Image (cartoon, grey):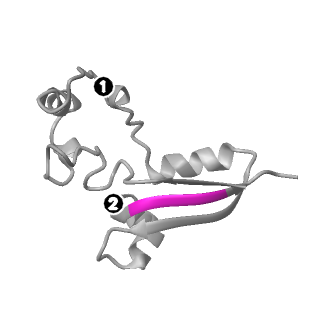
Amino acid sequence: QFFITFGPSWWHPYGAHHFFMIKVPWSHRIFSERTILKVRRLYRPNTPTQWRDVALNRMTVAKFLAILDASPFLVSDFRLTPIRPLPLWLVRRRLFREWTNANVSAVLTKPS
């Protein structure tokens, strides 16, 4: 068995993981990738040109579930943690889960 967890996912209000420089929710949806990465250079010494350069793969819940479905491993447990103080039922609804989850976790088991 192994455990995978990550967060926030891409559609989270702070999915671009740039808490240190911008406090605007969904800034990665409001501003272009180019703009955010240009401003980031004021805070970090490297010069990224795309999300991949700063280790962001734009992982969503749907994309992660598709990867799990294509995997030979069995999903023993899968959990979405809502953004506080939101109720748990929001992350359980497909319509809201991308926008309301703070963390994604799964336990995978190697098939026998």
| Mark 2 surroundings: few (<14), some (14-19) or many (≥20) residues within 10 A | many
Density class for disc 1 (Cα within 10 Å; few <14, some 14-19, many ≥20) is few
Task: Give the quarter of the image for residue 3.
Answer: bottom right
| Rendered view: 62 above or below 90 | above
Q: Is mark 1 on a helix, strand or loop?
A: loop
What's the residue at 33%, 68% (across, down)?
Answer: 83
- Residue type beneath disc 1: Gln
* Residue 93 seen in the figure: no
17 w.r.t. 32: above or below: below
The residue identified by callout 1 is 50
The quadrant in which the N terminus is found is bottom right
Q: How far apart are labels 1 and 2 at the CA level?
A: 23 Å
Name the magenta segment's main secondary structure: strand
**How far from the left and from the top, in percent, is residue 25?**
18, 54
Residue 54 appears in which quarter of the rendering?
top left
Q: What stretch is highlighted in magenta?
A: 102-107
Seen from the viewer's position, the closer of residues 45 and 111 is: 45
- Which residue is label 2 attached to? 99
Percent position of residue 28, x then y: 22, 42
Say left or right for 3 vs 23: right
Nearest the camera: 17 or 43? 43
Tag 2: residue type? Trp
Q: What residue is at 35 percent from the left and 25 percent from the top?
A: 53
**Mark closest to the chain's N terminus, 1 or 2:** 1
User: Can I make out residue 92 in this image?
Assistant: yes
Q: Are marks 1 and 2 in contact (CB under 8 Å)?
A: no
